[in-house]
């Protein structure tokens, strides 16, 4: 085993859904990081249409034509939350990024583009007895060449 | 900052074990306990489950015992090579994902390290064992991409 191999991760990506589990993910990242490690935080917002019209059996009541404004508001609110998280955990704010797209594709793409060597993500652990492994977490493990740490979180 | 207290390496005893051990080294502190587990699928399920005919096996049990013996030796060799004298290692007979989950639950494992097969750049299927472990594990799971 060469020395380089046993070195710490240099480029950690935290893929978060902005839930309360984000804190647990950041805690894991700090555990695994060395002083020179850069920690990136990524949240991918699903485009509004796919979130709503894809899964809902009815059309949500929304003032017509105001969809963009609504989406904009959600995005801004998330950005503010993100900035707060970054500040609370003393992360570099320029490395905390919100993108729009399909998380299953965007997260692996982002990891590759930024040469990340570890992705930390949460697996949804629903209230049922049987643990449930989220489809996004699975897609990340499948589609990335780097290590993936899947954090179990009990609700 | 708290580190993992008990790390379990779920190994298929292939050369990929090297990569898994390397990751464990990265994540360990001095007080972390390290265990290794290899599960041998019982022969009946390997054969009779997948083959359309009944193989001619004169003494199935004898063959299984020999396989287990050989794997044990191989496992011991890995342990010696990597100077893992303090590592608890176990060879179990059973469905790998179930054995891994049970071991993790009984021994308060807080991180499982497992290899996931796949070819670079290809949307490869996740190994079924890795997938099942990710599903059922009671703790964190580190999936390490291996290429062999």
Image (tube, helix red, strand yellow):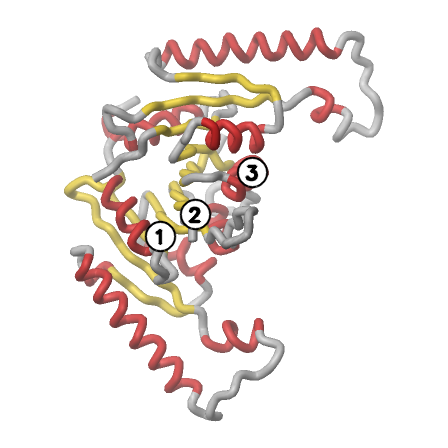
Residue B135 drawn at (x, y percent): 53, 44
Relative placement, left or right, of B59 versus A74 is: right
Q: Chain of mark 3?
A: B
Q: Looking at the image, is mark 2 or mark 1 earlier in the sequence? A: 1
Mark 1 sits on what residue? A111
Q: Are marks 2 and 1 on the same chain?
A: yes
Residue B118 visible: no
Residue A7 occupies quadrant: top left
- Label 3 crowding class (10 Å Cα cut-off): few <14, some 14-19, many 20+? some
Residue B81 visible: yes
Q: Are marks 2 and 3 on the same chain?
A: no
Nearer to us in this view, A30 or B146: A30
Q: CB of mark 2 within 8 Å of CB of mark 3?
A: no
Q: Chain of mark 1?
A: A
Residue at the (36%, 28%) spot, across then down: B6
Residue B18 vertical placement versus A141 (above, below):
above
Mark 1 to mark 3: distance in Å? 21 Å
Give the mark toward the camera: 2 or 3.
3
- Mark seen at residue A144: 2
Residue B109 drawn at (x, y percent): 41, 31
Q: Secondary structure at mark 2?
A: loop
Residue at the (30%, 77%) spot, across then down: A76
Residue at the (42%, 53%) spot, across then down: A155
Mark 2 to mark 1: distance in Å? 8 Å
Mark 3 sits on what residue? B127
Residue A67 vertical placement versus B103 (above, below):
below
Relative placement, left or right, of B40 versus A42 is: right
- Label 2 crowding class (10 Å Cα cut-off): few <14, some 14-19, many 20+? many
Q: CB of mark 1 within 8 Å of CB of mark 3?
A: no
């Amino acid at each position: 085993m060469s020395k380089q191999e046993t070195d710490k991760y240099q480029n950690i990506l935290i893929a978060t859904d902005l839930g309360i589990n984000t804190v647990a993910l950041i805690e894991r990242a700090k555990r695994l990081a060395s002083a020179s490690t850069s920690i990136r935080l990524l949240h991918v917002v699903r485009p509004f249409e796919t979130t709503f019209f894809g899964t809902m059996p009815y059309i949500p009541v929304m003032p017509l034509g105001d969809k963009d404004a609504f989406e904009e508001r959600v995005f801004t609110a998330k950005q503010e939350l993100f900035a707060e998280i970054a500040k609370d955990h003393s992360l570099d704010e320029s490395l905390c990024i919100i993108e729009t797209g399909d998380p299953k594709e965007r997260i692996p793409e982002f990891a590759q583009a930024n040469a990340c060597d570890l992705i930390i993500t949460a697996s949804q652990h629903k209230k049922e007895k049987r643990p449930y492994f989220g489809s996004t977490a699975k897609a990340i493990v499948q589609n990335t060449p780097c290590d993936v740490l899947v954090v179990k979180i009990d609700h | 900052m708290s580190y993992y207290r008990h790390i379990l390496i779920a190994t298929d005893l292939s050369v990929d074990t090297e990569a898994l051990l390397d990751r464990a080294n990265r994540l360990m502190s001095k007080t972390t306990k390290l265990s290794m587990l290899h599960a041998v699928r019982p022969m009946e399920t390997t054969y009779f489950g997948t083959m359309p005919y009944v193989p001619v096996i004169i003494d199935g049990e004898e063959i299984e015992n020999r396989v287990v013996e050989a794997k044990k030796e191989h496992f011991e060799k890995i342990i010696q090579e990597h100077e893992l004298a303090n590592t608890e290692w176990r060879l179990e007979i059973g469905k790998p994902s179930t054995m891994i989950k049970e071991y993790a639950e009984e021994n308060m494992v807080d991180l499982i390290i497992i290899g996931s097969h796949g070819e670079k750049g290809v949307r490869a299927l996740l190994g079924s064992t890795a997938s099942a472990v990710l599903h059922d594990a009671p703790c964190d799971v580190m999936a390490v991409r291996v290429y062999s």
